[in-house]
Image (tube, rainbow, N blue to C red):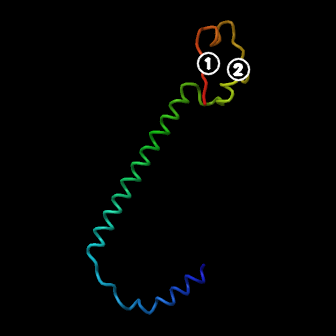
Amino acid sequence: MVLVSAMAFVAIAPFARHPLTPVPAFVSAYESALVANDVITAALIFALVIAVRLHIQSYSNIGIEQDHRLLCSPGRGRQPASPAQPSARSSGQKPVKLD
């Protein structure tokens, strides 16, 4: 690939002495394309930030330090409840299920 690029450079090098004709419309079209590209990129990054915040917020309710597989499997990874602290099942709360 480098050899092909070097050969193309050698073939085009003699034309470097001739300046290109100015095309003012090209600059306007190029700037418009850059603005459109920047707006689309900003919208995608903004949507990603919102999605990540919602994802983190949904995990902060259950405790991000615990693995979601342990929360979905009854009896695995849970500490036995002390008599002073009733378990979620005895207090009428439903266990959290994550997909």
Q: Residue farthest to the left? A: 24
Mark on residue 95?
Answer: 1
Q: Percent x, y for residue 79?
A: 71, 18
Tag 1–tag 2 contact (CB < 8 Å): yes
Q: Position of residue 52 (x, y in %)?
A: 50, 39
- Of the image marks 1 and 2, the number of the one nearer the N terminus: 2
The picture quadrant where one finds residue 38 is bottom left
What amino acid is found at the position of numbered circle 2 in the picture?
Pro
Using the rendered view, name the quadrant where residue 92 is placed: top right
SS at mark 1 in the image? loop
* Residue 33 numbered tag: none
How crowded is the residue under tag 1: few (<14 C-alpha within 10 Å), some, or many (20+)? few
Q: Which residue is at a point 28% across and 78% down the rendered structure image?
A: 23
Q: Which mark is residue 74?
A: 2
Query: What is the distance, in whole Å, between disc 1 and disc 2 at their CAs?
Result: 9 Å
Residue 44 image point, x, y percent: 43, 48
Please report the residue visible at 48 percent of the width from the left and 34 percent of the height from the top.
54
Q: Is residue 15 above or below residue 38?
A: below
Q: Nearer the viewer, residue 47 or 86?
A: 47
Secondary structure, mark 2, is loop
Tell me the kind of residue under disc 1: Pro
